[in-house]
Amino acid sequence: MKRVVLTLAISVLSGGLLSSKPAVAQLLPPAEKAARVRITQGPEIESASSYLTIVRWTTNNPGGSDEHFGVVHYGTDLKNLSETAKSHIRLNRGHPDTVFRVRLDALKPKTTYHYKVTSIESNGKSDGEESAINRFTVPGPAR
């Protein structure tokens, strides 16, 4: 048994796993931007409660930088969506679609909220698509 372990250790060491050369991360250039980003599903409320509400929507893959954010602008006044929530996402270049999920915290029970969604690159540049304004009502506490 000791001989097998020793042989394995020598194999690992000679294979360069403990090389003195530093590891180099390969950074990919930004992917080609989509000609037009479209919301293909949603937006919709995945779950709603006063402590946690999740808004979900799907777009074609926007391309550009791999680091993106889903953004929800919301509020109780239809004409003043003054609150903003956003969630980080890393695009998968191999998928034609991207699913965004954004968490809204600490909403008031039995209150109607209006919202619209969009997505942005990590540098803050919009992907160019924004949903219509939608609404949902936070349920009251369970009895």
Image: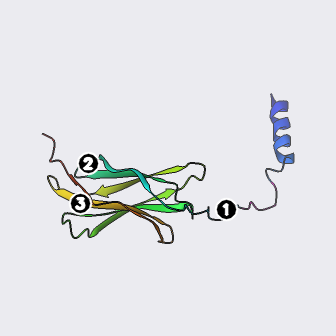
Task: Check disc 1: other Cα within 10 Å, few if <14, some if 14-19, many if 20+.
Answer: few
Q: Residue at x 23, y 60 (%)?
A: 114
Left or right, residue 96 beside residue 102: right
Q: Earlier in the sequence, mark 1 or mark 2?
A: 1
Read off the residue under disc 2: 48
Report the mark closest to the observer, 3 or 1: 3
Residue type beneath disc 1:
Leu
The kind of secondary structure element at disc 2 is loop
Read off the residue under disc 1: 28
| Mark 1 and mark 2: Cα distance apart in space | 37 Å
Front-most of residues 142 and 125: 125
Q: Which residues are magenta?
A: 19-24
| Mark 2 and mark 3: Cα distance apart in space | 13 Å
Q: Is residue 93 magenta?
A: no
Read off the residue under disc 3: 114
Report the mark closest to the observer, 2 or 3: 3
Residue 112 locus on image (x, y percent): 17, 56
Task: Check disc 2: other Cα within 10 Å, few if <14, some if 14-19, many if 20+.
Answer: some
Residue 28 locus on image (x, y percent): 67, 62
